[in-house]
Each structure stands twice: as structure tokens, then as C-alpha cells.
Amino acid sequence: MIRREFLALTAAAPLAAAPSRPSLCLFSKHLPKLNYDELGETVRRLGFDGVDLTVRPGGHVLPDRVAEDLPRAVGAIRAHGVEVPMISTGLVAASDPAARPTLSTAARLRVPFYKLGYWRYQGPEVEKRVGEVRRAVEGLVALGIEYGIQAGFHNHSGDYVGSPVWDTRSIIEGLDPRWVGYYFDPCHATAEGGAAGWRLALQMAAPRLKMVALKDFYWEKAGRQWRMRMCPLGEGMVDWPRFFALLFEARFTGPISLHVEYDPPDELDAIARDLAFIRKQMKL
């Protein structure tokens, strides 16, 4: 092995020892008006372990300010005893001017995981689109390896690439599982896979599961159209006992990010209620 390759591999060593249990995080999208210090204090008071911090357009950290503001954000949050085990980005190409500063800054701050952005299917040429996305992911994973930060591919339902999860497998298959895997969402997996499809998708994803997103929904008919109606955890269609049993079997210890995508009258009360539901399911 030549010296350059050796240095690249040692630079890409894991950022921290694996935790003994999952880190329960709040998706910072749901507290958009709080500054970094207020965010850390509120998340700690609610009882979370960490923050899933938005580092994307309109997020808590703006991409063109990431080198300056991400250290400020992480420092302020950690000052309250709360970690930042993952960031949610909008990155879809290594050529994005924000890609290198985002991943290098996050890695320097010892943030171990980041969520990739979204790609949509465009027209009937599905295989062609999957190939395009694979090439884009390869470039981002290469950057992640350079700096030492792991990528997660989110299975958002709809016309998003990755919504059925099976296409994600063809995209990341062959890429180093240490540096890219699944950001699994049982809500969207249920919407796409029904009674059994979500379970099969999770079992397929389990060996390289990086992060988990939690939300719930049920189908609602509006006129002639059926749509997803987001709701509090436990009030929708997600089979939570089975999901957490499978997560336990997978010995998952990565970040679990709570998303409150419905519109509650009291946001903080809804967050606290959903967190209590998660802890009950996990017997924490």
C-alpha cells in the first residue's frame, strides 16, 4: 500500500466508539425559530440524547455559512449536554459547492452521520435514473470516506428515488458499507410497502442500517384521492411493536430521529408525547 492510500484510510477511521444503545434525537426542523443555544436547552429539557440538525437551505445551518455556523451550532448544543450524532443535508452531488465544506466541517466536529438529499424519478426511464443517482452517490461517498463521515439514504415515499428501498440497494450495492447505508423510515416504508413490504425492506436494510426516522400516518380520502395523513406515533398504520422488535434484533445503535410532521396545537407537548411513546416501545 502506498503512503497516500495509507493516510487516506487512517484519516477515514471511525469517528467514535459505537454507542451501547440508539441515540434518541429530535429533528431540528420542528423548532425552526430557536437559536442554537435555545435548541440545545430545549432538546435537553425534553429528554432527548441529541439533535438531528438541519444543514440545508432553510435549515438551522445554511450551506453557504456551514464552515462558520456549524461549529457554533454544535458547540452551543453540546454545551447543554446534548450530542449532534447526525445532520440532515440537501446534498445530491459532490460538485455542490457546499458538499466539501459541509462534510469536512461535520467530520472535524466528530459528527458521525449525515443524511443525503433527495433525487426524484424523471419520466419512464427508471433504470437510467437509478444509474445517474448511483454515480452521484458514489461521488458523495468518496468525499465522506476522505473526511470520515457516513451517509444515509432516506426512503421517502412518492416519486423519490429510494422510496421502495429496493432501488436503494442497487444504488449502494458495491459501495463500502462502512460509509453508506440506509436511513430507514418505517412510516414511508409502510406507505410504499403495505403490510409486509416495510418489514422485508427493513430486514434487507438491517445489515447496513445507519439511521432511523420515526413518524406515523394513516390513509385519508380527500374527494377521489387518497393521501397520507400524518399523525402522532401510535395513532397510525405503522406496526410499532414489530418494528422495534426487528430493530432490536438488528442490534441497531445509531441515531433515531423523531419527526413531528403533523400539525399539533402545542408543538412541545406533541414532541414530549411522541418521545414518551418511543421510550415505552424501547423500554427505556
Image (spheres, rainbow, N blue to C red):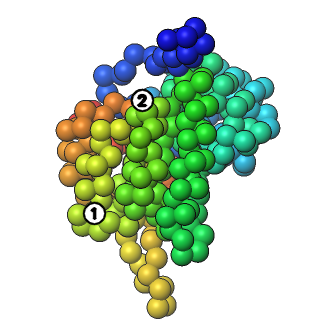
In this rendered view, identify the residue nearer to me: 234 or 58.
Answer: 58
Decide: is 157 above or below 54.
below
Percent coordinates x, y for residue 189 in the rendering: 37, 60
Rendering coords of residue 12 (x, y %): 52, 19
Tell me if I can see residue 269 in this picture.
no
For residue 178, the mark is 2
Nearest to the observer: residue 186 or residue 91: 91
Q: Nearer the viewer, residue 61 or 147?
A: 147
Q: Which residue is painted at 40% across and 45% down in the image?
A: 173
Q: CA distance from mark 1 to mark 2?
A: 26 Å
Residue linked to disc 1 = 197
Q: Nearer the viewer, mark 1 or mark 2?
A: 2
Q: Does label 1 or label 2 sit earlier along the sequence?
A: 2
Q: Is residue 10 left or right of residue 73?
A: left
Task: Give residue 211's quadrant in the image.
Answer: top left
**Coordinates of residue 147 in the picture (x, y in percent):** 60, 23
Picture layout, residue 193 above or below residue 253: below
On the rendered image, what quadrant is the C terminus found in?
A: top left
| Residue 208, picture quadrant | top left
Mark 1, secondary structure of its residue: helix
Q: Is residue 54 above or below residue 107?
A: below
Do labels 1 and 2 touch, CB within 8 Å? no
Is 192 left, or right, of 269 in this rendering? Answer: left
